[in-house]
Amino acid sequence: MSDNWKSRTRQVHGGTRRSQWGEVSEALFLTQGFVYDTAEAAQARFVKAGEDEYIYARYGNPTVAMFESRIASIEGAEDAFATASGMAAVSGALSSMLRAGDHVVSARALFGSCLYVLEEVLTRFGVEVSFVDGTDLEQWRAAIRPDTKAVFFETISNPTLDVVDITAVSQLAHAAGATVIVDNVFTTPVYSDAIAQGADVVVYSATKHIDGQGRTLGGVILGTREFIRGTVEPYMKHTGGSLSPFNAWVMLKGLETIDLRVRAQTTSAAAIAEALDGHAALAKLIYPGSPAHPQHELVRRQMGPGGTILSLDIAGGQDAAFRFLNALDIVIISNNLGDAKSIATHPATTTHQRLSPERQAAMGITPGLVRLSVGLEDPEDLIADLRRALDSTR
């Protein structure tokens, strides 16, 4: 692979390793184990496996390795470890490096399962976690201490679409010697420059835009080779959160078209935001690409376009939001995102339902909030569907 290849070329060819048969499509090595010629060869491999030597699929697999190499080359990372899901990536990145007595500072606006890992899992094992408003640099500055081990945030929060300044927070964290871990799902690998902007570790739910077609679960942790192979890999291979070869093959196929899909979805999302802005049924429309977004200039500087996700706050609360959802024809109701199909989600009763109404309100999750993941349908059809559903709520 050439160092001069641009991102779209890397998305198609990065990390490819062909067998002796010279296949065009990446080979699927659907095997959990590997054969050794001799007992001495088995012993030697367990002592130290070579670059193209494998022991067990939980430790590594040729198809998984191709996916790891390709996504690392796209992201600008030294290495990557592929995981069974996005949450395996989040929990693995954090748990592999933390121990009792460590301190973590996290943005408060997070996906419900991320909150669970930070509030319930890590604290159960003696890790101290402090939460801040991710958009307020003064809160980050006040919360980060000399003994802070890591900071964690979603670069664009789920579902309120707050945008965190990666460079500014990374500078504060690095001054204290802390590792910066970012969940970059809403930014996507297409628009990401997180490592160049200061992040040490980037995690993705590959289930979202990387697969992008609602087929398989997967995740990935990206960072320095030292962190991935010295910290993450030992933890993940012994706790069992690695990606299956079949799912890795699906993700490789997804990466071939991710640039085309995400850019088309972003164009549609921007058109929808413009078309629905000011609709009488909306209390608020949130889209990072809109000039009205409070961090719009940061969005332009940090990722460029506004991405594939909007949030619509329906006037009239949950009842009106449910009428809106039930009136949709093209847009489906589900809890995934980044899919070829447009998907609407009611966070207060699904992804964030375990949080109290007070916690939801503090995070900006109102009873009327609907997260909209824009797919690949014709934007004019989507706009007509959304307008008709909004009209039905009044």
Image (tube, helix red, strand yellow):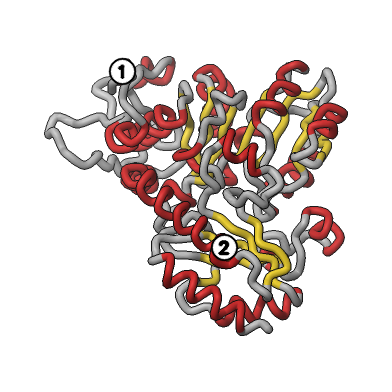
- The foreground one among 121 and 335 is 335
Q: Nearer the viewer, residue 175 or 250?
A: 175
Query: Alpha-carbon distance for marks 1 and 2?
Result: 53 Å
Q: Position of residue 251 (x, y in %)?
A: 38, 45
Three-letter amino acid code of the residue under disc 2: Leu
Seen at 61% across and 62% down, the residue is: 371
> Who comes first in sequence, dot 1 or dot 2?
1
Residue tagged 2 = 372
Q: Position of residue 326 (x, y in %)?
A: 58, 81
* In the image: residue 297, left or right of residue 63: right
Q: Residue at x 43, y 15 (%)?
A: 47
Element under label 2?
A: strand
Q: Is residue 335 visible?
A: yes
Q: Which mark is residue 41?
A: 1
Q: Residue at x 87, y 28 (%)?
A: 142
Residue 370 occupies quadrant: bottom right
